[in-house]
Image: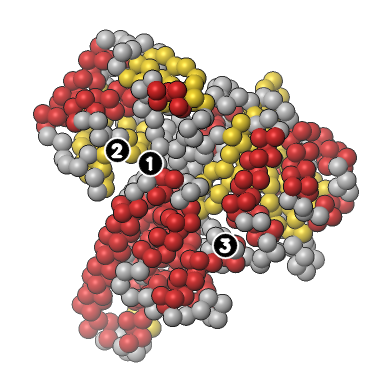
Amino acid sequence: MTANELRRAYLEFFKSKNHTVISGKSLIPENDPTVLFTTAGMHPLVPYILGEKHPGGTRLVNYQKCIRTIDIEAVGDTSHLTLFEMLGNWSLGDYFKDESIRMSYEFLTERLGIDPAKLSVTVFAGDDDVPADKESAAIWQSLGIPSERIYFLGREDNWWGPAGATGPCGPDTEIFIDTGLPGTPESRPGVSDGKYLEIWNNVFMQYQKNADGSYTPMSRQCVDTGMGIERTITILQGKTTVYDTELFQPILAELSRLAGKSYGDDPDVDVSMRIIADHVRTAAFILGDENSVVPSNVGQGYILRRLIRRAVRHGRKIGLEGRFLEKPARIILDMYGAVYPSLVRDVASVVHEFNQEEEKFLETLKKGEHEFEKMLPNLMKNPAKTIPGRVAFRLYDTFGFPVEITEELAAEHGMTVKRDEFDAAFKEHQEKSKLDTNQTFKGGLADHSDQTTRLHTATHLLHKALKIVLGDHVAQKGSNITAERLRFDFSHPEKMSAEQLQRVESIVNEQIMRDLPVTWKQTTLADAQKDGATALFGERYEEVVKVYTIGDFSIEVCGGPHVERTGELGSFRIAKEQSSSQGVRRIKAVLE
């Protein structure tokens, strides 16, 4: 079964179980400053899990593109990926453990044809705060999973949430398949030795964690499930790694052609090819996203830059000089364009950003090489013929110069780099970065504070005002909202004049002063567009959506939080207007 076949089978199965098929959302969370990227299928659905009514009802199913960046340095082995696709089905106060587990078992064994004898499961073992999940274990036993293949594990394995200090949380049950590998004496589900591979996770949100640390059963219980497409097709196709599937083989074949080296012949070359394939795939998805960002030194743009530059560096390691990322990038866009149409909405722009960032990094490498040459006379005076690790790290930290290239240059002059010193400095840098990331992006729950709600509503007014001042070619290209400001990207070919900015600001403030009502209704996307609603790229044409109307001024398809009247917004001020990428401008604005 291919990835495309698995996607279709999953949607069709749950549609037959009265689930509404909904669109996956952007990789760039629009109203959630707590995370850089959408990290799981449930992420865009948090408001509905917390109680907001979803236009699609109480049973939902979709596939969602996700990115997790914490293991970027681990990519290159046979299992880690930065981008993955998550299949998910949800119950919002509808069915709970029994129906959820039974549907999962039916899909795996009957629709996918997996031998039940290969399945093992884990459930929550309980602790002083919450009892063991014996209910899930009993359901699995009733389906024929024997007690010796049902493992009771602790919170680190079988508990989800809350995302913050308080909120919805609960036990989960994870489903594993026996890969047939020998494993170790410690083998069991949850032990990463290759013997058991997790393919599905059902989270049962049945508790509310309170501020005092206690847990209260929730009156409205929800189910959130997740199945990784890449991992599942690897199992279904009997492959050893995801890189052996159709999702990566065309990319690896192109890299082999470009480098004149075959994947599978040399372990070191294989590692570099896997890194390039993964990173170019992830970068293409970020650049081709509905809310795309471009390489930069902050936030999502920094992750994108890091991915592209790491891919370039590993290209050099396998003999690829100059620009080469465009070819594998075009293969990826072609492979996924039918599934994620935004990827091929503007192929030229995606390719341009790849090429431009490659050029910048190649220029960085030249600067680093020049800096190395300047340091060389002093370095050569060292009779030990070694380069201190702190010097190599300064080249890396200041100039973005990879230590591997420093080692190459050193070797040309009969020198070596004190790699242990560099590794120690790099580890310290990594730990600080991870600490900063965890502090900044520890939540994952959408921020629906009063301030972000006001700012989100203001983006609707801004969008319409820009169309009035600049023309109907203006379309939203991305949005990011924190408690302090809104950031709005839109299509426009040139810098806005001071007069245009002033006019936009005045139009928005005029609508605020009018104290217009903000109302909403549910309808299909097709009917919303007939009514003149602005809609972002992404939703399916027949999908039921929310349409927000602001008086006689604006009508837009949206799922975010809104105020009831524009008079609640205060005073709108544009703080900055700048270029975001080719043909895209960016406005940062505040409410005062």
The reply, left or right, for residue 106 in relation to residue 94 is: right
Would you place residue 289 above or below residue 551 in this image?
Answer: below
Q: Are marks 2 and 3 in contact (CB under 8 Å)?
A: no
Q: Quadrant of the C terminus?
A: top left
From the viewer's perspective, is residue 474 above or below residue 339? above
Residue shown at 50% from the left, 69% from the top? 252
Given the image, on which type of amino acid does mark 2 rest? Answer: Asp
In the displayed structure, does residue 451 sit left or right of residue 21? Answer: left
Q: How is the image coloured?
A: secondary structure
Q: Which residue has dot 3 on it?
A: 246
Does the CB distance between marks 2 and 1 fall below 8 Å?
yes
Q: Nearer the viewer, residue 303 or 8?
A: 8
Distance from Cα at disc 3 to Cα at disc 1: 27 Å
**Picture coordinates of residue 298, whole percent (x, y):** 33, 49
Residue 127 rendering spot, x and y as whole percentages: 76, 38
Q: Amino acid at mark 3?
A: Glu
* Residue pointed to by mark 1: 291
- Disc on res. 489: 2
Give whichever of 386, 159 is nearer the camera: 159
Q: Position of residue 240 (x, y in %)?
A: 66, 67
Which of the two discs, 2 and 3, sits closer to the camera?
Answer: 3
Indicate which disc, 3 or 1, sits on the residue closer to the N terminus: 3
Residue type for callout 1: Asn
For label 3, the SS is loop
Judge from the rendering whether residue 583 lies leftward or rightward of residue 6; answer left or right: left
Question: In the displayed structure, does residue 95 sit left or right of residue 489?
Answer: right
Label 2, label 3: how far apart the Cα atoms are: 35 Å
